[in-house]
Amino acid sequence: MGELEGRVAFITGANSGIGKATALLFAREGAKVGLVGRRAAKNEETAEEIRQIGGEALVLTADVSQPEQVEAAYRRLIETWGRLDIVFANAGINGVWAPIEEITPEEWDQTQAINAKGTFLTVKYAIPYMKERGGSIVITSSINGTRQFSLAGATAYSCSKAAQVAFAKHAAVELARWKIRVNVICPGWIRTNIPENTWRRNIEKIAIPTIRPEGGIPLTGKKPGEPEQVAEAVLFLASDRASHITGTELWIDGAESLLRT
């Protein structure tokens, strides 16, 4: 039997990168997986991969910034499987990276809506279903906004990531009475498609040179981390092995963030 046998997981941003790797790993470990993302076709591709390895998956097309869509996704998951044990609030964008004076209010709001508000909604609507049995909530933050503040133009993104950590700590205390654990992962440079959701504008105007060793990541040099390495950490936090861990950040970056702040 797998570590998550009989459990039901709700994963946002599940059709690529860290979310997809985690969904596949959870399925291998026996969990039934609800796949949440804005692109139905991509969600179905991930679902099919899970079915091919003998797992169970449910496609839940939703935009995490829209409360009605998130709430409806949970209702469908519960109608299908009757329980909720694990939430992985992973969906996010880099958004616009630009000088603060050039970031428009609309650009700021877009980043916060997906990253900060999306995390809030994903947790908020999970709570009623998790109170009966308890469970694990894991939130994807970043080294940016927690340990690293030197990436030019990343203000909106970093603020959204810092907000996720503060939110997780409050949630960990508030939800502990129901045995709901809330933890945060902070990945560094991981091989994902999130650069596709990054729009850089005039950051050379504000960039300050930083000195880094050859390659930039002490553990791997020029090689980024893999989504599967992050997924293993999420599995640990979601499992009974982490039964006394809540309100905690876990940096997954090969010591990258210790080189520059």
Image (cartoon, rainbow, N blue to C red):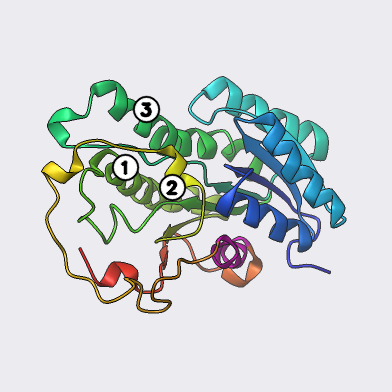
Q: Considering depth in this image, is 201 or 91 the residue closer to the camera? A: 201
Q: Nearer the viewer, mark 2 or mark 3?
A: 3
Which corner quadrant holds the N terminus? bottom right
> In which quarter of the view is residue 60 placed?
top right
Q: Position of residue 255 (x, y in %)?
A: 35, 74
Other residues around mark 3 within 10 Å, as few (<14) / some (14–19) / many (≥20): some
Position of 4 with respect to 203 (left or right) is: right
Q: Quadrant of the C terminus?
A: bottom left
The local secondary structure at tag 3 comes to helix
Real-space Cα separation, disc 1 to disc 3, in angstroms: 10 Å
For image coordinates 47% across by 34% down, the residue present is: 118
Magenta stretch bounds: 227-238
Per the image, the residue denoted by label 3 is: 110
91 sits to left or right of 45: left
* Measured Cα–Cα span from mark 2 to mark 3: 23 Å
Percent coordinates x, y for residue 117 in the rendering: 42, 32
Q: Position of residue 227 (x, y in %)?
A: 56, 60
Residue 163 within the magenta-colored segment of the rendering: no
Q: Residues within 10 Å of mark 2 (few under 14, many from 20)?
A: many
Q: Quadrant of residue 215?
A: bottom left
Image disc number at residue 171:
2
Which quadrant of the view contains residue 34? top right
The residue labelled by disc 1 is: 157
Q: Earlier in the sequence, mark 1 or mark 2?
A: 1
Residue 29: where, in percent of width, then height?
A: 76, 63
